[in-house]
Image (cartoon, grey):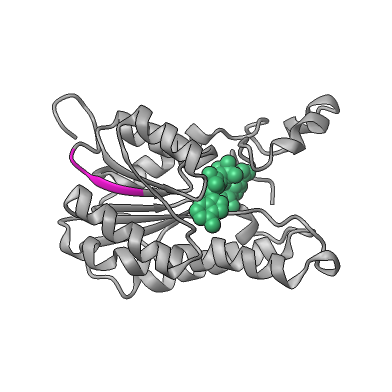
Amino acid sequence: MNRDGKKLVGRRIVVTGAASGMGEGIARLFSSEGANLTLVDIDAERLASLAKELRAKNAVCDVSSEREVNTAVDSAARSMGGIDGLVNVAGILVRKQVRETGYDDFQRAVGVNLAGPFLMCRAALKHLEAAEAATIVNIASLAGLRSQPGMAVYSATKAGLVAFSEAFSGELGPTVRINTICPGVIRTPMIDFMFEAQESDGSVKNLNRAARPGTAEDVARACLFLTSPDSNFTSAATLAVTGGHFR
Ligand SMILES: NC(=O)c1ccc[n+]([C@@H]2O[C@H](COP(=O)([O-])OP(=O)(O)OC[C@H]3O[C@@H](n4cnc5c(N)ncnc54)[C@H](O)[C@@H]3O)[C@@H](O)[C@H]2O)c1
């Protein structure tokens, strides 16, 4: 923390999925905490506008493409002079019964939700290891910890990400910490379609013990904790940010 109480001053951080929802919330909070950011997303227009507003660098990139990830990470490291933190937020929802899920849906979900963080971590590793105290935060999902009928493929990608993060932590030296956040129901453009019905029948209050959907800022605050020195003895952890889920 510096004299203004800001927790990320001078930290060089890459955030994927930054053009919307939680990624945008994390980018806004990290920027206000003094971080030097490179924002990564596939949505070029929204990315450019947020990067301009936050005076951050940006890299348009499909995180499921090895070539695009390697280029984006190299350019982030070059323009920021290194990388101290990586936050993998980019993801897509597949909300379909298995019988209705095409193999292309499956491959896309695995590509973005699981290969994406793997490719980003692998590309960023040499930069993170060269930094003084580096952090990785992967955004998985409560769906990766609890079975979610109708979301088998999505749940599998997120369970895979939890396992990947835990196993990868064992390959990292003491200077790189890695943690996973499993958000519950968070009101973002990804799942906004759910809320009209839930608000009109009142079931939105039964989502969790907090009796409300989470916000991007709720997740961003947990991510700030895991990226800042406040969590310097926390690694290989999986943190449920769910408002207190019922099962
Ligand atoms: N919203 C929820 O309730 C919820 C709950 C648990 C976990 N999650 C996870 O949290 C993360 C953020 O979700 P959100 O709710 O903010 O969604 P969102 O749709 O608002 O944002 C996702 C962002 O990822 C980007 N993206 C998608 N595919 C990409 C790709 N191939 N390459 C680069 N960027 C890509 C999108 O352009 C978008 O900006 C996702 O990994 C999601 O699976 C969401």
Please tell me whether the stretch drawn in magenta is mainly helix, strand or loop. Answer: strand
Q: Is residue 13 magenta?
A: yes
Q: Is residue 179 magenta?
A: no
Q: Residue at x 41, y 58 (%)?
A: 237
| In this view, 47 is above or below 136 | above
- Is residue 51 visible in the rendered image? The answer is yes
Which is more toward the observer, 44 or 223? 44
Residue 84 relative to residue 178: left or right: left
At which x and y percent is residue 223? 40, 44
**Residue 193, image x and y in percent?**
75, 37
Is 112 on the left or on the right of 99, as rendered? left
Quarter holding residue 190 = top right
Q: Is residue 145 visible?
A: no
Identify the residue shown where x is 51% and y is 64%: 64
Specify whether 23 is left or right of 210: left
Could you say which is closer to the camera, residue 28 or residue 48?
48
The residue segment tinted magenta is: 10-14
**Percent position of residue 209, x then y:** 65, 36
